[in-house]
Image: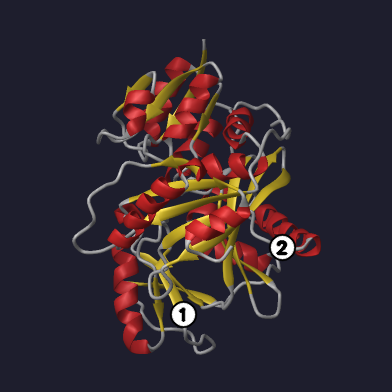
Amino acid sequence: MKRIAIVGAGEFQNPLILKAKEMGYETHVFAWKCGDPGEQAADFFYPVSIVEKEEILGICRGMQPEGIVSIASDLAMVTVNYVARELELAGNNDVCTLRTTNKFEMRKALCDAGIPTPRFCLLGVQCKSLPQDMHYPLIVKPTDRSGSRGITKVENPQELMEAVDCATAYSFEQKAIAEEFIEGEEYSCESISFAGKHTCLAITKKYTTGAPHYIETGHVQPAEFTERESDKIKMAVTCALDALDITVGASHAEFRIGPDGEVRIIEVGARMGGDCIGSHLVPLCTGYDFLKMVIDAACGRKPELAAGDKEEVAAIRFILTEGDREQLEQIRRIAPGIIAAESPLKPFNPEGVLDSSTRAGYYILAGNREKIVDFFGMTL
């Protein structure tokens, strides 16, 4: 029996577990036990926190997996790469792990490689002042978290101290990074790498709540660019992946395009894009089996780049308000055929949506661009 170790069992991780089982793997899944869907989907579930890398390594030594993988968490990738290195499995090195899980180290690496970046600095509990050459507005966020946690746009020194306190409260190392705000639309590029060679699979348009916290409200593929613009984006992303020493597996590069047309990398994860971007939107929109690619790469096999059937547009919309839920009900009545998937609806958070984890649910639409435009409620 082929075995694979999977770190994480949450809602956005579960498609990886199901794909591995479909591919004939015996799945060994590690996560804190809290009722996540992957606990039931796994062939073997171990109630071990994803940060307990030594304990996970010990279990993996005993069962000898072909690979170890995760798709939905930067934090999980620390353990994935550590175990992969110790067992001589496919994975990224320690330099890559640091640069792709710590936003300050990431910014330094991109800057050293000559990749256009905003001015940035490291802040913390004991340091909440900016260098003289940095100017407002700024984005302040934890150095080592994802999922829109602790992110704030600040316009002046009075707002800065509160934003740093918020970011450091979320940060495992109690540090924050401040970056000069980049104007422009937000996008991401989903890629697969193997033996240091990168292939960009799709470019995604991102929608957020805007300032001050920029919580994602939806994503659409494909983002509309000319061939020349797409080539420019892919070149910038490839340079960033090289600068961060990503050599194998999925990656999710977030970027903005400024008024001058310059592609500016915001941050890069050495994993699939969360929010169903990699697991659902990429295969729907491109025909690529991205999950299979990630599993193959983790098991030391070159991913196949054959594309199957695809839709013209794929989009995910998150439910943040009662109005969002009512919009989904309208789509169910009028055009149920464009609903590709939807999550169970959680109770609305009485404090409002604070980050990605407090959204009430989502639904995914796929099909003709004109129909998606009619119902998505966003400009595609």
Q: Tell me which label, 1 or 2, sits earlier in the chain.
A: 1
Q: Residues within 10 Å of mark 1 (few under 14, many from 20)?
A: many
Res 53 label: none
* Outermost front residue: 334
Name the one closer to the observer, 220 or 103: 220
Left or right, 119 with reference to 323: right
- Left or right? Give the position of 372 relative to 140: right
Residue nearest the viewer, comparing 102 with 272? 272
Residue closest to the eye, 265 or 378 = 378
Please state which of the two labelled residues, at mark 1 or mark 2, is closer to the viewer. Answer: 2
User: What's the amino acid at mark 1?
Assistant: Leu
Give the residue at mark 1. 138
The quarter of the image holding the C terminus is: bottom right
Q: Position of residue 130 (x, y in %)?
A: 44, 84
- What's the residue at 64%, 59% (across, down)? 223
Q: Secondary structure at mark 1?
A: strand
Q: Circle 2 — which element? A: loop
Residue shown at 33% from the left, 54% from the top: 325
Q: Which residue is mark 2?
A: 225
Can you say whether 180 is above or below 253 in the image?
A: below
Farthest residue to the top: give it.
Answer: 1
Please state which amino acid type lies under the numbered disc 2. Answer: Phe
Q: Pinpoint residue 213: horizontal percent, then vertical percent.
A: 38, 70
Q: How is the image coloured?
A: secondary structure
- Return the residue found at the far left: 350
Instruction: Give the vertical position of 234 relative to 179 (above or below).
Output: above
For disc 2, the neighbor class at 10 Å (few under 14, some 14 to 19, many from 20) is few
